Amino acid sequence: MKTLDIILLIPLIFGAYLGYKKGLLLEIVSLFAFILAIIGAFKLVDLGEELLRPYLPDWEKALPIVSFILLFVAILLLVNMIGKITKKILDMTLLGGLDNFAGAVLGLLKWAFGVSLVLWLAQSVEIGVSEEMTKETHIYPIVASIAPFVVESFAEYLPFIQEVFDNLKEKFIS
């Protein structure tokens, strides 16, 4: 195992550890909470403004923003709290260990994608890792291929993803 492999293993192990601590359920709940908080805050922003108006009469222009932020945080905290309670119950069963293991796998995959994305962006702006460093590595070729594969796979169904990546490359190169 070469030095580059060891360097790449550090964030991957860290990601697996964080995923293990959180578990698959909380990983999924946190993503769901974020999406639900955005949708809920947009849907309830008018009601939030009405409720806040008597307490913040001088903040008329800022009320939509304050309302959105408060609703977003409240929904996010509520959904995450429900997820944590469910996780505690799940940990008391035999499925708790499986949840932690699946969380470790998901955490590892998330961090592998992130590291791969950084490597890919660096390579696209010609700051990549030299061929000499990558010779005879075991982990680098696997990790380096993850982000291009995922982005290209999703680009077929969501073309804007490739456009976003191309725009990022243009900004860094010029």
Image (tube, rainbow, N blue to C red):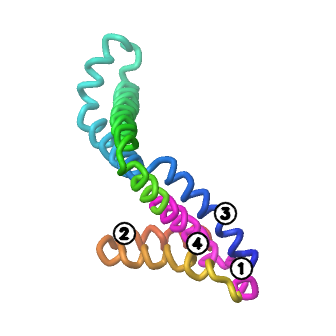
User: Which one is in front in this view, the residue at disc 3 or the one at disc 4?
Assistant: 3
How far apart marks 1 and 2 lie (CA) works out to: 38 Å
Whether residue 139 can be seen here: yes
At 30% across and 43% down in the image, what residue appears? Answer: 36
How far apart marks 4 and 1 lie (CA) works out to: 24 Å
Instruction: Please name the amino acid that badge 1 sits on.
Output: Met
The quadrant of the picture occupied by the C terminus is bottom right
Quadrant in which residue 48 is drawn: top left
Q: Left of 43 or right of it: where is 148?
A: right
Question: Magenta part mainly helix, strand or loop?
Answer: helix
At 36% across and 49% down in the image, what residue appears? Answer: 94
Q: Position of residue 22 (x, y in %)?
A: 47, 47
Instruction: Please name the amino acid that badge 2 sits on.
Output: Phe
User: Which one is in front in this view, the residue at disc 2 or the one at disc 4?
Assistant: 4
User: Which one is in front in this view, the residue at disc 3 or the one at disc 2?
Assistant: 3
User: Which one is in front in this view, the residue at disc 4 or the one at disc 1?
Assistant: 1
Q: Are marks 3 and 2 in contact (CB under 8 Å)?
A: no
When the figure is inspected, residue 73 is found, relative to residue 13, above or below; the finding is above
Residue 129 lies in the magenta stretch: yes
How far apart marks 3 and 2 lie (CA) works out to: 32 Å
Q: Which residues are magenta?
A: 106-134
How far apart marks 3 and 4 lie (CA) works out to: 20 Å
Q: Position of residue 50 (x, y in %)?
A: 26, 20
The image's mark for residue 121 is 4
Q: Residues within 10 Å of mark 4 (few under 14, many from 20)?
A: some
Instruction: Please name the amino acid that badge 3 sits on.
Output: Ile
How far apart marks 2 and 4 lie (CA) works out to: 17 Å
The image's mark for residue 160 is 2
